[in-house]
Amino acid sequence: MATMDSKTSANEVPVEERLRALHDLQKVVSEIDKIKTLRGELPLEVQDLEDEIEGLETRIKNLEAEVKSLNDGILTKKNEIKDAGLLIKKYEAQQSNVRNNREYDSLTKEIEFQTLEIELCEKRIKEFTVEMKAKSELVDASRKQLEERQSDLTAKKAELDEIVSETQNEEERLRTKSKEIETRIDDRLLTAFKRIRKNARNGLAVVTVARDACGGCFNKIPPQRQLDIQIRKKIIVCEYCGRILVDDQL
């Protein structure tokens, strides 16, 4: 038979009172769970929207930095084209005063090199312009998406705030009550209660025996164990799901 700390001393709280405290605590925390259910997924939705907005803001900031870098690159290439053009004019003027074919050919090669530099810069400018346009469009799309998400967040927060304001006083009252009940339960038992509750899908750590079955997992409870539960001399847990069992007359 699965039990929890069935031995009691003269100074210990009777098992029945401990069971009653556990049952009372379960009722209170279940009411708190109902309030959380009423709020539904709103807190998570608000958090997701806040995370998405933060991500969009970072993305926009990075894209704007890339657009600026591309624009600076275009300006740099334009200056290089200007410098190359001045060099070409300089070399063409020098060709008029050369003393031999070797000097003329050398200046011609310099002119050809600067001409290629201009063509390369123009190619880079076209590439940068296309890339900058694409990134600017991404910035605009991201800003539009950011505005939509900020609007969604405002609406979700207003909805959540309304529900919280309606339930806050009741939740605070229940939490205060749960803290008071917890003082009636020894630390080891309270820790076990919280562990069971955390692992239970519906948050039920304490359940009654209904129709000869565990109120948590609905497995049958043997008659002898039901009798032990009704006597309230031991803390008994379900051998199938581990929940603490109490009789419905507690």
Image (cartoon, rainbow, N blue to C red):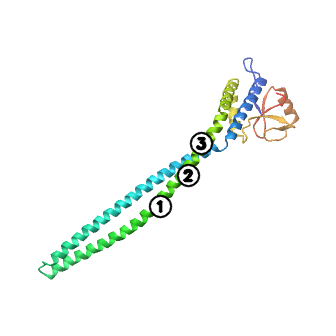
Disc 3 marks a residue whose amino acid type is Lys
Q: Mark 1 and 2 residues: CB-CB less than 8 Å, in contact? A: no
Q: Residue furthest top?
A: 10
**Alpha-carbon distance for marks 3 and 1?**
30 Å
Q: Is residue 230 left or right of residue 133?
A: right
Q: Which mark is residue 14?
A: none
- Which element is circle 1 on? helix
Disc 1 marks a residue whose amino acid type is Glu
Foreground of the two, 107 or 42: 42
Q: Mark 3 and 2 residues: CB-CB less than 8 Å, in contact? A: no
Q: Is residue 217 above or below residue 136?
A: above
- Which element is circle 3 on? helix
Foreground of the two, 2 or 176: 176
Disc 2 marks a residue whose amino acid type is Glu
Residue located beneath label 2 in the image: 148
Which residue occupies 57% across, 46% down? Answer: 153
